[in-house]
Structure formats: C-alpha cells, structure tokens
Amino acid sequence: MDAGEDNRTGDVVDRATGGATGREADEEPTIRIDGRTDGHGGRAARRDEAVRAAVEQGLLGPDTPIVGLLDVAGIRESAAALRAAFDAVTAPGTPVLHAFAVKATPLVPVLRLLREEGIGAEVASPGELALARAAGVPPSRTVLDSPAKTPAELREALALGIAVNADNPQELDRIDGLMRSATSRSPLGIRVNPQVGGGSIGATSTATATSKFGVALRDEGAREWVVRAYAERPWLTRLHAHTGSQGIPLSLLAQGVAETYALAEEINRRIGRPQIDTLDIGGGLPVNFGSDTETPTYAQYARLLGEAVPGLFSGRYGLVTEFGRSLLAKHGTVVARVEYAKSAGGRPVAVTHAGVQVATRTVYAPGSWPLRIAAYDGKGRPRTGAPVVQDVAGPACFAGDLLAEGRALPLLEQGDYAAALDTGAYYFAHHYAYNSLARPGIYGFTQDGAGEGVSFATVRGTQSLDEIVAESGGAHADALTTRRAPGRG
Ligand SMILES: *Cc1c(COP(=O)(O)O)cnc(C)c1O
C-alpha cells in the first residue's frame, strides 16, 4: 500500500492516547515513536508531558485557552533522519541541499532551528524570503520557487545569489533581461510539470495535466522548447519538479523524479555537455495522520528513488530537496480548552477554542484532512474512560466549525483540553482570521535532563487585541466616513 493513501480513507485512529495502530508500509519495520509502546520518552510521551506542563506552568488555562506546542527534539530528529537518508544513498561528495519548504511552517525560530540542523529554505513569496533571511538562512542555501514572481522579486533574488527556478517562458524572458544587465551568482533552473497525474487530494496535486505549475512537459512542443531554452542559455544549470504533496503515492512522486532525471539526461546529451548539474526534486513526502508511527520514512523514500531512478545518486548531479510537511507535521500539537460541554440532538458536543482559525483545511475539507484528537483532563493529564461518540467543535460562528465530527473519544468535559495532533505543518502557523480570532501563542518545548521537567520557549506570542485592530484597519478608522458621497452637496 502506498502510504500516501493514508489520508484518503478518513480512517483516523481516535484513541490518540491508546498507542499506535496505524497501517505501516510493508518494506521495513517502521520506527515506533509512540511513547506508550516504547516507554522511552518517545513522541507521544513527550507530548503528554508537555501538555501537562503547559497547564501546570499556566501557559494554557482559562485566560489562554489555546496554544500551539512544538517538540524541539522531534524536529531535530526529523532533520537528522532526512540528512541521514540521503547521505546513505548518494555517492560520496555529492552536494545535497535540503531546503525546507517555508510555507509548511513559516516561523522564524523554526527556520533558525532547521538552519542549525543543516537545512536551508525553499521560499515562494517576498514574505517567506524575509522570514528565511530573518532566520539567517544564507542566500546560498535558499531557493525561490513561486509561480508569480514579480520583476522586483526576481531582481532581488538574482542580486542576492538565491537559486531561482523559472516557472514558465514569460518568467524566463524576465530573467533573460536581468541576466543581460547584471551578473548573478544565482543558480538558475526551470520548473517542469512532468504531468504524471494527481493523488487523492486535488488541491495538493501539482503534476496533473492542467496544473498551474511549471512548464507542462507533455504538451505539444514543450519538451523541445525546454531543450532549446537550455541550449541557448549556458547559465541554466538546474532542473526542478515538485510532483505534489499530501495524498500523492510514493510511486507517483518517484515517477515525477524519474521523468525529471530523464529530461536532464536528454538535455545534457543533446547539447553535448553536462550543463544541468543539479536536480531539484521538490518535496511532498506524505505524512501519516493516523497514528504516531512515522511512515513513510525518508529512508524508504530515498531507497525507492534509488531503485526507480538509477543514476540519480551517482554523483553526476547535485541534489536539492524541498520537504515541508514531513519535517514538521508530527512535531506540532494544538491544545485547546473545552469552554463548554453540551449536548444537541443526543450528541455530546465539546465547544473548544480550536477550530477553523488553526485547522482551516480540516474544517473545510474534513474528508481529506482528518486529524487525530487527544483528550486531556483539566490538569492536562490524558483522559481515560470509555469512548463516547462526540463532536469536537471550534469557536467560530458557523455550524461547520468542527475539528472532529462523530469521533469516539473519552467524554470531554468543561475545563478539559482537546489536542489536535500532527499540526506542526500547515495548521497553527497558517492562521485564518475568521471571526477575528487571535493567532495563538506557539511554544517550543524541551525535556530537561532525565525527563524530569519540561521547559518552554516562546516561538510566537499570542496575538493581542491591539494587533488585531491594527491589522484590521484600526489606523484608518475614519477612512470611509470623511469622504462625502458624490452628488450629496
Ligand atoms: C509546497 C511545496 C513543497 C513542500 O511540499 P510538502 O508536501 O510540504 O513537502 C515543496 N516544493 C514546492 C515547490 C512546493 O510548492
């Protein structure tokens, strides 16, 4: 089974506090990270300790009813696993840049932590580039990929020496103009869409026939255009593809890389020199949202790539990767207080402070993005008790604002906490301003010594009401009333 299918079924393990039972890839025993099964301070045990400590230390409570928690040790482990996976398969001396897709978790301290772990940044907007720079990620370890780069963005990237992948012929025209007027250290490439097809989630499938990204390789004349583009521009030395994200089966990801590799080989052969020296294979490793088991692993993917694309790791090409979700998702937890526990039509409903503002995709597309929910009591201890089918609702004023619908969990009571697991990527860092709900504070946690205590570092403070007013036009309160309507004298 392709691990990428995990999200298709909506078959989420509800007993987040009851051990990992998720489906596992067949090829190798996957790493058990659930603390309750390994008993060695694994991920779930660390999470439980952090939730309890957050309540004990007053980070979470009646006046601060929602926080995001990040497991610093877990992030370091994933970064190390990524590096090790590619080190194990690449020829010695192969340059490999792992560039974290900033969009997955756009938080400066996270980017700084990853930088310290040897991970660069893939950015796709002026804001993301600013975050990477604020984190101190050097231009030589930054890649710019947005599909809508303005001339000013391109000029800045080329001046800084940031790698740029041109999305389309019009963008390449703009780069031509800039390259004529100045020299640049930027490694430059073209993004292609191998059009190998989509996965189970349309919104994250980037290699469909009509995807908006890159040069659609199978369209008439496109391949010839790409070959000519390289032949005419000796400074085009990279080739880029990102086949998709969550919901894409590993085999399809590998096929996208295989097509990209074959194109690079063809280009180099036809122009008679190894002009393309680096392949950017994108990100997209899916995440198992069904349990604490990490599957698929980077090691599995790297091995699969080695089998599917012989030559990729031979050392003839340097490599860039752009993983996002798989680096951060399992290290984040949203914890929200149950403000009220009620019942409607016979169904218990826990009204919490986590909803559409922190779990936008899950609320609007619950079939594609189910999340595990863990129940904690008012002291932050895992709730035990017989599972009861209930809804876990958010605070927003529309009926569909549900984190989980009809989920069997120990019955949540007023003053308890509900935790949405695996939310370190594309969740609490992706605030949606519905109902002017505040962005929750985010704290990184580490265990001291022999698991004796948990300490927290502020990654981002809770958004204040003043900040909400300011970003909602507070400085322009009179902007509309001081103008008279035309014709009213
Ligand atoms: C979103 C994106 C990524 C990261 O995808 P993940 O599924 O988070 O690994 C990488 N590259 C590009 C170009 C992207 O758009």
Image (spheres, helix red, strand yellow):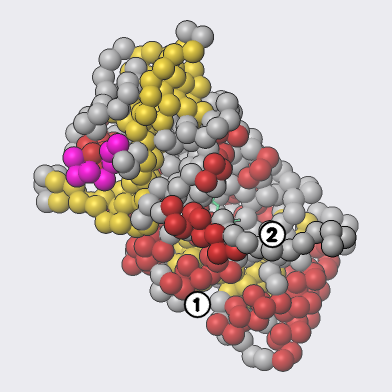
Residue 172 locus on image (x, y percent): 75, 74
**Residue 139: which numbered mark, if any?**
1
Location of the C terminus (image quadrant): bottom right
126 vs 266, nearest the viewer: 126
Specify the quarter for ligand 1: bottom right
User: What amino acid does circle 2 point to?
Assistant: Leu
Q: Residues within 10 Å of mark 2 (few under 14, many from 20)?
A: few
Principal secondary structure, stretch drawn in magenta? loop
Residue at 24%, 52% (x, y): give it.
456
Residue 120 seen in the current view: yes
Q: Is residue 178 above or below residue 317?
A: below
Residue 195 image position (x, y, % from top left): 74, 50
Q: Amino acid at mark 1?
A: Pro
> Farthest residue toward the front?
489
Q: Secondary structure at mark 1?
A: helix
Judged left or right of residue 457, residue 475 is right
What residue is drawn where x is 78% and y is 81%? Answer: 232
Q: Quadrant of residue 452?
A: top left
Query: Residue at the location (80% across, 63% down)?
Result: 223
Q: Nearer the viewer, residue 68 or 251?
A: 68
Q: Residues within 10 Å of mark 1 (few under 14, many from 20)?
A: many
Residue 84 occupies which quadrant of the picture? bottom left
Q: Which residues are magenta?
A: 56-62
Is any atom of residue 272 visible in this view?
A: no
For disc 2, the marked residue is: 480
Of circles 1 and 2, which is in front? 2
Q: Nearer the viewer, residue 454 or 394?
A: 394
Residue drawn at x 32%, y 42% as measured from the top left: 64
Earlier residue among tags 1 and 2: 1
Q: In the image, is residue 419 part of the stretch drawn in magenta?
A: no
